[in-house]
Image (spheres, helix red, strand yellow):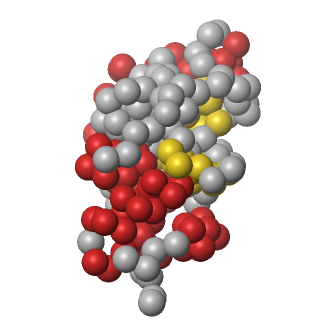
């Protein structure tokens, strides 16, 4: 049986980041769920997923250019991008000197006034490098604006940052004083 890994990744994302209740799974405070429960829930959601296995989860993780999920000790979680109502617990970490955020020109004007806010997500997403921020911003505008976040300075002033993965950092908010 051939499994469409892109479609599976979207299904996993929906279950772990946005609507776990649809799949009758419950995330713990750190966003983890038993991988066998997730697999069972996805299998029951549609006939196309009947042959789904843990090997398919591993294949999704290997095939992605972004590290979106973490699989450990028979459990799985999404690393970032959550919109579930209950805020997941994160451990603050020391960010690099600068982080980047790609956005539309219209949103950039608002961000300069009110700072970076999580909007419909739990956290603000920040990129480790300008290239990734350009790719993210290009989804919002053909000519995105790239904002530079003085993350080290913000952190020293008490703004908490959290490691999402090797390319994404998270923050609750970033005040405009730390955005160029």
Quarter of the image containing the C terminus?
A: top right
Who is closer to the viewer here, 57 or 116? 57
Left or right of residue 152, residue 29 in this image? left
Residue 109 visible? The answer is: no
Q: Residue at 70% x, 26% y: name it.
A: 93
Left or right of residue 173, residue 148 in this image? right
Residue 24, percent across and down?
Answer: 31, 47
Residue 132 quadrant: bottom right
Who is closer to the viewer here, 152 or 66? 66
Residue 172, percent across and down?
Answer: 48, 23
Q: Residue at 48% x, 18% y: name it.
A: 175
Residue 161 visible? The answer is: yes
Residue 122 quadrant: top left
Left or right of residue 131, residue 137 in this image? left
Residue 41, percent across and down?
Answer: 36, 59
Q: Residue at 36% x, 68% y: name it.
A: 43
Q: Residue at 45% x, 38% y: name it.
A: 27
Left or right of residue 38, residue 74 in this image? right
Residue located farthest toward the bottom when viewing the structure as drawn? 1
Residue 51 quadrant: bottom left
Above or below: residue 127 compared with residue 158:
below
Residue 173, percent across and down?
Answer: 46, 22
Quarter of the image containing the N terminus?
A: bottom left
């Amino acid at each position: 049986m051939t499994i469409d890994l892109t479609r599976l990744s979207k299904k996993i994302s929906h279950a772990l980041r946005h609507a776990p209740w649809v799949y009758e799974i419950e995330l713990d405070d750190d966003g983890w769920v038993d991988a066998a429960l997730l697999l069972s829930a996805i299998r029951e959601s549609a006939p196309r997923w009947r042959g789904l296995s843990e090997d398919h989860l591993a294949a999704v993780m290997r095939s992605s250019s972004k590290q979106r999920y973490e699989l450990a000790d028979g459990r799985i979680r999404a690393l970032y991008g959550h919109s579930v109502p209950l805020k997941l617990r994160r451990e603050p970490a020391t960010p690099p000197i600068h982080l980047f955020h790609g956005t539309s020109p219209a949103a950039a004007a608002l961000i300069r006034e009110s700072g970076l806010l999580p909007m419909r997500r739990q956290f603000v997403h920040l990129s480790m490098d300008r290239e990734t921020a350009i790719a993210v911003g290009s989804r919002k505008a053909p000519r995105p604006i790239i904002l530079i976040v003085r993350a080290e300075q913000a952190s020293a002033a008490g703004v908490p940052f959290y490691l999402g993965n090797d390319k994404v950092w998270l923050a609750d908010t970033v005040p405009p004083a730390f955005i160029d």
